Amino acid sequence: MLIRKNTKAFKTILQLFQQVQHRENREKFIRVFITRAGNSVHERISTFSIPENGALYYNMTFATILTHLESSDRPLHVSDELPGLYFFHSSLNSAWDESPFEFDEVLINEFSTLPELPLPRKKEKVEKFVLPTAITKSTGEPGKKEKTPSTVTKTIREKKEVAQPAFGLKKKIQFTDLQRVVFREAKMNKQEVLNYYSQIAVYLLPYLKDRPQSVRISDIRAGSSVSLTTRSLFGNHADSIPEWIKTKELTIDKEKADWMLCNDKEHLMLCIEQGGIELHSFLSRTATLPYPDYSVISIDAPDSELSKAITVALALKEITDGLQLPSFIMTDGKSGLQVFLPLSPSTSFKKSSHIAKDICRLVRLKIPDLVTIHGLQMDTYGKVILDYSLNEEGHGAITPYSLIAVDGAVVTIAAPLFWTEVNEDVKMEHFHPATIFKRLKQSGDPFATLFKKKINSDELLERITKNYAFLF
């Protein structure tokens, strides 16, 4: 039976997956299965029936299911013959039951307040399933015991886990799970993620220095960022916190916590080792939390139509040039752009937000048929959304040169651009770990002068009010 996406039943199932996606024991709440291409749920294989690889297959399948739930090309069904067993179909494989899953009663009880809860299923006995292995030739040497393929695989895996990457760090960090797949479609593992951040550190660290961070951890699917505190990174395992780690006690959103600051390569790599993928930097530094260094305007393209976002960005540049306001632009690695406006010292978040909002209003006045402003009650269909809501204390923006936690064929980067590059040729997939270092070597960092350029915020607001306020 099909479960339509606009129903409460479907929305509850999606919410259940999103609620448990970052839990360590999520397999106790939701069981996932694998089916061979062309087969049905009757021939499903429990991910944890595969010795030694159960956790890997569970994580990959869980991520796939969450992607299907959030997409529009995989209709969700519940089995009529096996109540409580859910699966997907694609338009190309209408007979193939993809990615079956089921809920445990424990999860249903915990989220009993949600509407139209799915049917739970009792846990069945899991029978061992052995993955097929390659056949190896016998050496024929008498008295020599040969290793079976599974033993060879295990030995190789153990060696890979033991071998530590050389990142030239001054402090010791034990890197783990190096072969774990982080970006499934791009086939990028944790070792490669660590390699990227080790190489980009010299360019990345200036945008992290003395700033609280939030990060997307482990699961690259949708989910809220977590604060970069010792509690979020290490939980209650205080004994696993390195002695050399440096933290700063901060009260943010009325909550006091020990924040880890990525002021050097060692702290950055520790963050990535603990599961960090996408980094978000606060707009202000720890010593001056109420005063941001820059204001940020997001330009969000509808339906990934980046060309529309580029048109809006160029209109915004005309306005900032007219106001004699320096501006910097970068891709957000997804489908939009972000503009940074450097501010004078002691500019409050209130003034920063006011500046960003007024510039958004001026852009909308310039091209009203193409632009809408986030939070305003107006028609948004097919329009580019200008968003200034990040300009609040305790909020962060994607850090320049951060990897973006979106699983696609190419792992993208939040890439700073020169304004001369902002044209219809810009594509998100052009900026990835294989191209960014050549680009930096040839052209340098477009944001190199971000912290050197400042504006007089009070004088700018006075000019906008005097010359343009009557238009608002």
Image (cartoon, rainbow, N blue to C red):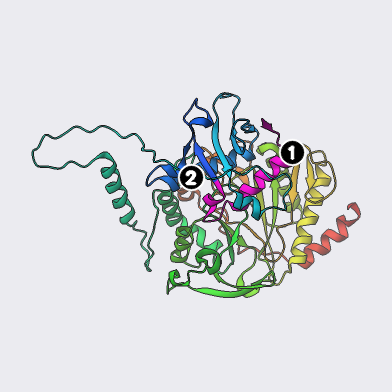
- Helix, strand or loop at mark 1: loop
273 relative position to 472: left or right: left
**Percent coordinates x, y for residue 20 in the rendering:** 59, 52
Residue 305 shows in the view = no
- Label drawn at residue 7: 1
Quadrant of residue 137 within the rendered picture: top left
Tell me whether circle 1 and circle 2 mark residues in contact (CB < 8 Å): no
Q: Nearer the viewer, residue 405 or 197?
A: 405
Query: Magenta residues?
Result: 1-30
- Is 30 above or below relative to 343? above
The residue at 82%/38% (across/down) is 369
Q: Residue at x 51, y 31 (%)?
A: 42
Q: Position of residue 277 (x, y in %)?
A: 52, 53
The amino acid sitting under disc 2 is Tyr
- Residue 100 highlighted magenta (yes or no): no
Crowding at label 1, few (<14), some or many (≥20) Cα neighbours within 10 Å?
Answer: few
Q: Is residue 382 left or right of residue 412?
A: right
**Distance from label 1 to label 2 (Cα)?**
27 Å
Q: Which mark is residue 58?
A: 2
